[in-house]
Image (spheres, rainbow, N blue to C red):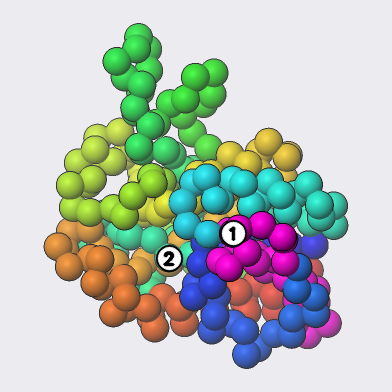
Amino acid sequence: MVLFIFAEKEEYEMILPHIEIIEENVFENDFNKFQSFNLCEYNKKKFYIACSGVGKVNASLYLSNICNICPTITQIVNIGPAASIGNEKIGDYYLIKNSYYYDVDLTSLPNYKIGMLPNMSITFKTSEILNNILQILFDNNIKYCDNATADHFATEKDIALIQNNFKDAKTIDMELTSYIHTAQFYKMPIASIKVISDNLTKKSNANDYKNNSLIWKTAIAKLILKILEGGK
């Protein structure tokens, strides 16, 4: 069964009128005000929707918890907003091939690059099999790109660092690399589609994220419905 995972509830709120929530799961901890895990149904197709909370630690902790308690999950899909470091249009979407931690810096030590953790690859790859399935579903019309993740809201000052170290990265977020990292630990296939919500080349990008929310939220809802209607 597929798990759709998001950082915030507002990212998937426009899909809620189209689906039925069959079962709500609330974990008894201090984080359940913003974290959720629900069994849902659309056209007799069951799936899960989870909200992890913002940031790398929330992403990893919550996805780990779900993977531990829910053996029926067989694949993970993250669809969410992301900043663009180029001139990509608000509402455009990209299938992510690789993702990186751009706020990891151990370069004061020998042989380390930006984004590299000890004893680990610098690159966190999504599932090639899931990516191929999504490409077929979308008639091979989704462009690929890489993503970069950090625990801060990206701004124009981050562009040079990302371009210099991750040449194929076009999107920036605060969770995806941690989702992939966690999915790999559990040997779970994961794919991600990022929808452009704001552009780092504009100094107003923090405001644009909110002002453009109807555009990217609508795009996310359409992507989810497309997957549910076309997936097996």
Q: Nearer the viewer, mark 2 or mark 1?
A: 1
Q: Quadrant of residue 148?
A: top left
Q: Is residue 189 visible?
A: no
Q: Give the residue pinned by disc 2.
A: 81
Residue interval drawn in magenta: 26-52
Q: How many marks?
A: 2
Binning the other alpha carbons within 10 Å of mark 1 as few (below 14), some (14 to 19) or many (20 upward) gives: some
Q: Which residue does the image show at 56% across and 66% down from the upper left?
A: 34
Q: Which residue does the image show at 49% across and 75% down from the upper left?
A: 10
The C terminus - image quarter: bottom right
Relative horizontal placement of residue 194, taking residue 71 as reference (left or right): left
Amino acid carrying mark 2 in the image: Pro
Q: Nearer the viewer, residue 5 or 98?
A: 5
Q: Give the residue pinned by disc 1.
A: 31
The N terminus - image quarter: bottom right
Q: Which residue does the image show at 64% across and 52% down from the upper left?
A: 62
- Dot 1 lies on which element? loop
Q: Mark 2 vs mark 1: which is more N-terminal?
A: 1
Percent x, y of residue 135 = 58, 61
Percent x, y of residue 36 = 65, 66
